[in-house]
């Protein structure tokens, strides 16, 4: 009997160990399955990554982005009802849906490439129709006084600057076959096209806009001062040197000069590259490292295609602290309407987009312009 009890005890012990091993084996199998699923998701994400080395910000796609991608590819009528509920209805009566913040971020990031003023200016966001900024119109006046002398009034004076947010709209036509091709990342394709068009439109306004139904450009501000080049129709002085540009840069207050950026178009930049100072040194210098800007007289250059070219009484160059002088405000929302009908005979789907942006010079003394004149 004792032998049987011992045998039963041993059997129960072995049985418990086997059960433990089985549980451990099943846990390992579950862990391996999770790893395999994760690797599969990674492979899919890598395969769908946009060309040019751009990778998704995260592998987990939000419900809004997933629904928005379905709307772009299939339209509302062919979308599952649960995805339609994830779309955000536009803020006006013209239809369409608001793009998710991730998509808007991609558009704005692309706009910077095509709207060079954004690289230099101060950019913010607003949910209002306009932004009211306090602007100092008079500086405090300090004076030396004796121990008992009455202290004079020395408070600074302030005014207000209103930056109105205007509406910009555009449309992009995309091939029906391209939309149907599952291998194409339509979100990236559409974001790039919208960024290019909005960037072109706002880039011109930030430079030359008259403030009528569009942002006011810094070159249109009558408050921004200027100096002359020294010759009637070019940026070089009478000796073919760069004294006009040197004088222009040093007409800025030191604070603005030390934070300044040059702005001009490519034709003017080509002329500047040929100019030398009094010691026969070129004032233009190439970038010291990849990703760094080229410089003129030690300050970085931004090429803006909308800047005027050289010519009599024209202003082809601006330099200044654009971060301080010029403000840009974006409305966060971007509305998109899918139109599969108007271009159907051409095999195209038209996407109508609209967004709102404002811009204006708020501190004229921080920028100076060069005038081609004697």
Image (tube, rainbow, N blue to C red):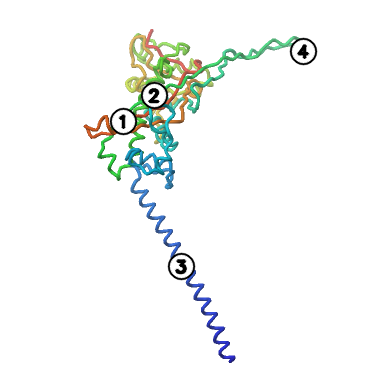
Pointer 3: what residue? 26
Pointers 1 and 2 in contact (C-beta within 8 Å): no
Pointers 4 and 1 in contact (C-beta within 8 Å): no
Mark 2 crowd level (few <14, some 14–19, many ≥20, 10 Å Cα): some
Mark earlier in primary sequence (2, 3):
3
Q: Where is residue 47 drawn, in percent x and y?
A: 33, 48
Question: Mark 1 to mark 3: distance in Å?
Answer: 53 Å
Q: Where is residue 22 drawn, in percent x and y?
A: 47, 72
Q: Is residue 319 above or below residue 96?
A: above
> Who is closer to the viewer here, 100 or 272?
100
Pointer 1: what residue? 172
Q: Quadrant of residue 317?
A: top left
Is label 3 or label 4 in front? Answer: 3
> Who is closer to the viewer here, 356 or 359?
356
Question: Mark 2 to mark 3: distance in Å?
Answer: 59 Å
Mark earlier in primary sequence (4, 1):
4
Question: Mark 4 to mark 2: distance in Å?
Answer: 60 Å
Mark 1 crowd level (few <14, some 14–19, many ≥20, 10 Å Cα): some
> Who is closer to the viewer here, 134 or 130?
130
Q: Quadrant of residue 265?
A: top left
Is label 4 or label 1 in front? Answer: 1
Mark earlier in primary sequence (4, 2):
4
Q: Is residue 242 above or below residue 35?
A: above
Q: Is residue 215 left or right of residue 349?
A: right
Pointer 4: what residue? 147
- Look at the image and tell me whether residue 243 can be seen: no
Pointer 2: what residue? 168
> What residue occupies the far bottom of the structure in this picture?
1
């Amino acid at each position: 009997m004792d032998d049987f009890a011992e045998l039963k005890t041993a059997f129960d012990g072995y049985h418990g160990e086997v059960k433990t091993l089985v549980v451990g084996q099943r846990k390992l199998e579950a862990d391996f399955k999770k790893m395999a699923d994760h690797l599969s998701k990674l492979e899919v994400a890598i395969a769908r990554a946009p060309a040019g080395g751009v990778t998704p910000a995260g592998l987990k796609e939000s419900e809004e982005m997933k629904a928005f991608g379905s709307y772009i590819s299939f339209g509302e009528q062919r979308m599952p009802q649960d995805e339609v509920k994830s779309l955000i209805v536009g803020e006006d009566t013209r239809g369409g849906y608001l793009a998710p913040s991730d998509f808007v971020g991609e558009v704005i990031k692309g706009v910077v490439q095509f709207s060079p003023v954004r690289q230099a200016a101060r950019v913010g966001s607003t949910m209002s129709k306009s932004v009211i900024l306090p602007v100092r119109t008079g500086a405090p006046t300090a004076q030396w006084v004796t121990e008992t002398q009455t202290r004079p009034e020395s408070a600074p004076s302030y005014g207000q600057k209103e930056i109105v947010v205007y509406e910009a709209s555009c449309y992009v036509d995309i091939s029906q076959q391209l939309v149907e091709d599952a291998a194409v990342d339509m979100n990236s394709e559409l974001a790039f096209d919208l960024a290019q068009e909005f960037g072109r439109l706002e880039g011109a306004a930030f430079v030359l806009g008259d403030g009528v139904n569009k942002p006011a450009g810094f070159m249109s501000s009558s408050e921004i001062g200027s100096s002359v080049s020294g010759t009637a129709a070019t940026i070089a002085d009478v000796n073919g040197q760069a004294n006009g540009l040197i004088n222009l840069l040093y007409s800025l207050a030191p604070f603005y000069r030390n934070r300044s950026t040059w702005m001009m178009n490519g034709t003017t930049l080509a002329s500047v590259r040929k100019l030398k100072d009094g010691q026969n040194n070129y004032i233009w210098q190439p970038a010291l490292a990849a990703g760094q800007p080229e410089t003129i007289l030690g300050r970085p250059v931004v090429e803006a295609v909308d800047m005027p070219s050289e010519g009599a009484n024209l202003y082809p160059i601006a330099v200044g602290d654009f971060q301080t002088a010029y403000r840009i405000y974006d409305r966060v929302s971007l509305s998109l309407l899918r139109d599969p009908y108007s271009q159907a005979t051409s095999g195209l789907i038209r996407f109508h987009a609209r967004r709102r942006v404002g811009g204006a010079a708020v501190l004229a003394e921080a920028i100076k312009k060069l005038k081609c004149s004697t």
